[in-house]
Image (cartoon, helix red, strand yellow):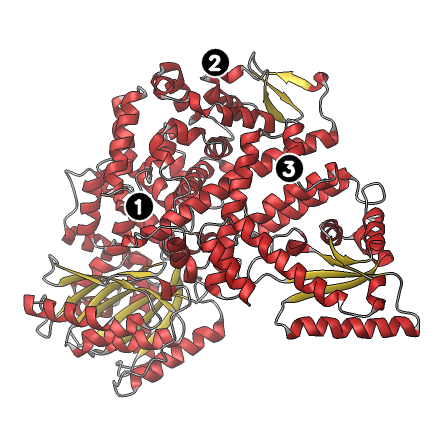
Amino acid sequence: MAGTQFIHQQFVEGASASTALLLRTEMIDSILKQMWQAQDSIFDSMALLAVGGYGRQELHPHSDIDIAILLPHAHDSAEDRERDEKLSHWITSLWDLNLDIGHSVRTVSDCEREAGSDITVITNLMEARLICGNEELHRLMQNVIGVEHMWPSAAFYAAKLKEQEQRRTRFQSNAYRLEPNIKESQGGLRDFQTIAWVCQRLYGTRALDPLVEKGLLEPQELDTLRDGLELLWSIRYWLHHVAGRREDRLLFDYQKDIAHAFGHNDDTDNRSIEQLMQRFYRTVMSLQRLNEISLQGIGGIISGVTAASEIEPINSRFHTRNGFLEVSHDKVFANYPPALLELFLVFGNTVRAEKVRSHTVRLIRANLHLINQQFRDDPVVRRMFVRIFTIPDKLTRTVRLMNRYGVLAAYLPSFDQIVGRMQYDLFHIFTVDEHTMGVIRNLRRLMIERFSDELPHGTSVADRIKRPYVLYLSALFHDIAKGRPGDHSELGAEEARRFARRHGMNSHDADLLEWTVRHHLLMSITAQRKDIDDPDEQLEFARQVGSIEYLDHLYLLTISDIRATNPELWTSFKQSLLQSLYEHTLLILQRGLDNPLEAGDVIAKRQARTLTLLNQRWQNNPKVMQLWKQLGEDYFRQYQPVEIARHTEILLAAEHENGPQNGPLVSLRYSVSKGSTEILIYTPDDKALFALISVVLERLQLNVLSATITTTDTHYALDTFHVLAANNLPVEDPDQIQQIKQTLVQELMAPKDIPALVVQDPSRRLRYFTVNTEVEFNDDESGLTEMRLTAADHPGILSSIGRILLNADISVHAARISTLGERIDDVFLLSNAHGKGLTSTEKQHIRRLLMSEI
């Protein structure tokens, strides 16, 4: 359509989105009016109305063209049936023009009945705009749905608030955080439209100027609303254009093209997309805040909350009224700038203060310019800021409000850089500032007894924290340098040290804060990449931590950080790994770093402890020691006594019942200590075992978390795989457990040809991420080679790795598998055909194969 091309050209050349939407609306108006007026006189009795976005004159390139047709009376007579038939033909003719028409046909009585009971219908009809036809019918419809006949302002306001709350709940899932819905997500177009709808019901106009006239918004706030609306319209326009269809979600598929359309062209490390998304998230954060201010102000007018008798004073600057914290007068911040922080200290420490009054929020925003360097240098202000993090209750809500109202970013300029900043991956689903708020929330809940059932072990550790404020500040600073060149942990630690010095923290607390920020990734990396059952690895980690206090802080920050990064990636397996690492390290630190147990002593203690756990029938049986000798010393470095006891009993019981083992033995059980399903496989050794088992487990749709391979003196393999089902939970269904056992036994008894894996296409999301394959080798103290592989995730990747290593005659002794969004970060312990670590030539060969084939 030539008109559409002209409008797009105007938009590309600099016309605003609102202009483009109006031009498209007028073009469709012209087409519909011409086609309506070309019909016979029977159409004169009806009214053709534009509704929805079309009625608001906000018609995007592929939006539905929603119309409502008003009939003078119901479908009773032959003349009415003739009219209905002609109307049906007319609508069909619009579809023949490839117009995406959505239509409703009602009488005025229908409108009155349906609108009276349905908030959606009344909203739709309130926006109705006459295109052509019977003007009197349109006026009559407007009259019957008027506020004096139905949906008085208070009822309409309450219904719209409920509708907004329900909508936000529907669109707050992880999927919508990574790929937000421009219309429906929090701070999106619907938030603006909700203000306009309520304003229209109260003041009779969709224009928001009455909000300024009534003092509910400042002129610059209305400008901010309109600028935000313009940006969202522009993004939505480009979404429709790039997708070639109606699309309201800012999907990964389109983010780069739209970033380029907005002039963000630096694609280094996806910087262009991150710049677009930060602009988007800052805008919706602003719109969300103005939505709150506007609707709260309107609610105050509707409810008439003005009586001075309801005021409960707090001090000369603040009071509460009906649960809202308010300033005592409009000059509070201008007269005493530290009150900009004092307000949050008062809010956090005042039980009856449930929210901040919208007028006070507007005053905060209007006075943010007072938070300058002189303000930051004020000792009173500095003490006040630190005291906020000692609030005994409502800490999370208080800090969230500081972020939402812009005070946190104004006081800490470094924090301003992370507000609305997203990372273009599938691992981090929150903006950095929102993630930071989540970490503080998680830490706070660990300190509160009523939430102890969430993470009982974490809560018990939190009970020992003497100065929680240091922990909360470590959360505030741990990602404050995200997005800057360099190591964000190091840069964040430097920021934390400067903060501690400027805010008068004692040297002990300052050192603890700086260290925790600098090393906030240490514990998760160790648990993910190292064999935490190995006494040497435990001792090395304990030496890096140094003290129980530092261990407690690091552990609590780590679990809170992971849970606030992506809740779907927090599994019972990760929880158990971190708890196990914590407990091992605690024992070492309690014993003293100067007095560690030798590896041989650790093994002896594990064997002694295992003997006490064995079933009585095996405790004095010489076969136990025979089996343990066959398993070798490395086996006892890799497993804990509970696991050793279980393996021992399974193997000896099988031999007792069936005689010497010839075929494969497969056993499944829920591992409490690992929060996963452990698959134990005992079978004649074969270099193809890891590749074979990997394929089978992937075919069974099991997620492999770790694998440990032990070869006995009798040339048997004792392999354990820790897995989760597709839903990221341990396998519990008895039928599924039986299927896994039968399938593994069947494949292990067959010739060792690796079965084919039905490779599935990567998900839509995975296709839009480029992850460079990286292969690192380190020679292990045991004489083996540790290989760390980072690569793009895709279905079947573990079995592909297994095949490559098998074909290169490389044996796998252990594997730790980690999937972080769109990437894998796996560690393998390898040996060559001679049972030794890999040579330089072998390393180069494996690296070349993985780089080219994964």
Q: Amino acid at mark 1?
A: Glu
Q: Earlier in the sequence, mark 1 or mark 3?
A: 3
Taking the spot 76% from the left edge, 38% from the top edge, the residue there is 153
Q: Amino acid at mark 3?
A: Leu
Disc 1/disc 2 C-alpha distance (Å): 50 Å
Numbered badge on residue 583: 1
- The residue singled out by tag 2 in the image is 336
Helix, strand or loop status at disc 2? loop
Q: Is residue 839 above or below residue 451?
A: below
Residue 8 at least partly seen = yes
Q: Earlier in the sequence, mark 1 or mark 2?
A: 2
Q: Earlier in the sequence, mark 3 or mark 2?
A: 3
Find residue 458 and report its horizontal and vertical position in percent. 40, 42
Residue 744 in which image quadrant: bottom left
Badge 2: residue crowd in 10 Å (few <14, some 14–19, many ≥20): few
Residue 467 in which image quadrant: top left
Q: Amino acid at mark 2?
A: Tyr
User: Observer-nearest residue: 542 or 469?
Assistant: 469
Find residue 242 and report its horizontal and vertical position in percent. 45, 62
User: Observer-nearest residue: 685 or 390?
Assistant: 390
Badge 1: residue crowd in 10 Å (few <14, some 14–19, many ≥20): few
